[in-house]
Amino acid sequence: MIRVETLSKQYKGVDVLNRINWRVEDGAFVIVTGRSGGGKTTLLSIVGGLTRPGEGKVFIDDADIWQLPEPELATLRNRKLGFVFQFPSLIPTLHVLDNVLLPIAFSGRNPNVEDREFAGSLLEMVGVTGKDDYSPSQLSGGQQRRVAIARAMINRPSIMLADEPTGDLDEKTEEEIMRLFQRINGQGTTVIMVTHALGYVKSGLAYTLKNSRLMPYEESEVASGSCAGEGEL
Amino acid sequence: MRQIFYLVRQNLKRKPFRTWLMIGGIFLACATLFTAAILSKGIQYTLQTAGERLGADIVAVPADAREEALSALISGSPSTFYMPLSLEEKVRKTRGVQQTCAQVYLRSLDAACCVVQVALVGFDPERDFTINPWVLQKTAEPLQNNQLIVGAKVISAVVGTPAKAIGQRLMFMGKPFTVATILEPTGLGTDYTVFLTMDMAYRMTEESPLYPVPVKRDQISTILVKVDAGTDPALVAQSIEQNIPELKAVTANQLTRSFSRQLQNLVDALFVAGGIFSLLALILAGNLFALSVRQRMRELGLFRAMGAGRSLVFKLIVLEAVCIAGIGGFFGILAGFAAVYFGKDIITDMIGNLYMWPDTGYFLQTALTGMAASLLAGILGGLYPACRISGCEPYEAIRRGE
Ligand SMILES: Nc1ncnc2c1ncn2[C@@H]1O[C@H](COP(=O)(O)OP(=O)(O)OP(=O)(O)O)[C@@H](O)[C@H]1O
Ligand SMILES: [Mg+2]
């Protein structure tokens, strides 16, 4: 379970996140939308242990992650979390299979045969087969994104954080990737996804980040409908 | 750990030119510094040995022929200068003088045997203390009239190793001689000198057409002096010159200094070059490395997002720097080692007076020191970028790297 308590983050004196309280149950499929620059990536990276919050706490399975010593936080990122970035994130010097196996190397052991087999099955699942020894630059953008998803799953994380995983992809690929995450979620993994693909909003619990606050999607639509303008009381 | 090495290797292969540039800089610096260190030690040994092998603490020569005499002593250029034998007695009576012996120089000759012009010098085998200690093969018997002792460079170039020269027959001024033994190199004039008995030297001038007026038996060219133990040769030399105005007294130090200056200049130049190279290498490699880390901020941030701990990223960068410095240092030292080791003879030929080399132990010691220094430089060079990057929050690093 993920619990966020009165989480705030400012950049240069400007609120990006303001006193956010949030709960994500195990096995949930959560979608976060919001305007560009609204702070979605910031929220995700604070939850994922990549950006220190200004104030507030993040609990993952009852561990206050920003109170953990750095090595333990690193272990948590490595074992429990899978992060898929908004931008291409494969390591250019490593070929596809090594990219997928990289988190295993960071867990302090050398990948064994089983790891390789698992990596192979993940690549099959994401639909990039027969390209194990390609370098990332030899893949298309969508393929790179899918390899990054496979990599995020190699340590069997209980939580997947996906930041606009379908960002600049065509509709058909977008659909495939969405289905992929639904499948991942079906296996019991909690998925938190930032997306603008509103067509999928219905497929999970949806939230909107607006004015530095996180609110349920429907509600925010109503709110923006009733209160004209940005004025606050 | 194997994975870390793999990552380091992959990364070094990414920009091979840059990697080689960094390695090359360190290579050059290490090679020159290593060579300079070895040469400088060799020179130090050479000077020390030259002083010892000269045998005498002071050499007294006729004051009116001092330039000529000094050049004969230092470079073995054949020359003739004489003074009365009686001066030796006066020198021996000077305070602080323990022992003396005289030598007589004969006119230059182009001997068919030899590569270079040689000086013929007569000495007294019974009283000598300057030549006998440094012969290659010592014999109990004093030198006979028909025997020679030759300097290290007189014929060794012709016969190969110096030892092969022993037993060779040589003709000088129409008289046959056999080479009794060879002198160890000194770096001074004796390397180009042929020694024979004093008696024979006088006899040759009496019988040779080269000498219309033979050198008289009461004429000598140099007086070699050994001072009492614990006495400063410079002071003794001073009092010799004061007491006997006809003499110019030169200490062994002054003689070796003449060529030590030339050698020292060479070593200084090498050290300066090594220093400049090192500085440039450090600046070049340090900057390139810092740049390569900066360009990889995003990637290193991603590593951490995937669960690489701060210390792992730190190790990764330091290890990379150490690899570069280590490879550069290793091959630089290897090159310096090879250059000095296999180039010894060439260097000796080029700088005639350098003939003593440090032993293998010193080579190894210098190599290890150099290796340690370059690894240390690697660690230091890696430390700063490593600190900077591992101090960043992962997402911050990723963002900044974009
Ligand atoms: N490290 C930073 N320093 C300064 N400002 C930052 C930093 N990171 C984010 N911001 C600012 O915080 C705001 C939120 O950024 P964030 O990346 O979270 O937005 P987003 O909702 O993910 O936008 P997008 O949909 O375009 O990805 C932006 O205005 C951005 O400029
Ligand atoms: Mg974003």
Image (cartoon, grey):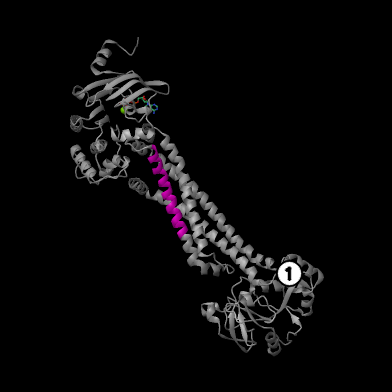
Q: Indicate left or right for B345 with A179 as reference.
A: right
Q: Indicate left or right for B108 with A191 as reference.
A: right
Please state the horizontal and vertical placement of residue A111, each as a whole percent of the image: 27, 44
Ligand 2 quadrant assignment: top left
Q: Main secondary structure of the magenta part?
A: helix
Q: Which stretch did the figure color magenta?
A: B310-334
Q: Is residue A73 above or below residue B282?
A: above
Disc 1 residue crowd, few under 14, some 14–19, many 20+, Cα 10 Å: some
Please state the horizontal and vertical placement of residue A84, each as a whole percent of the image: 28, 33
Q: Residue at x 32, y 33 (%)?
A: A76
Check disc 1 and give the amino acid type.
Asp
Please state the horizontal and vertical placement of residue B308, each as a whole percent of the image: 35, 38
Judged from this view, the residue extending furthest toward the top is A233
Element class at badge 1? loop
Q: Residue at x 48, y 56 (%)?
A: B368
Where is mark 1, residue-wise?
B228
User: Can residue A212 be seen here?
Assistant: no
Chain letter for the residue marked with disc 1 in the picture: B
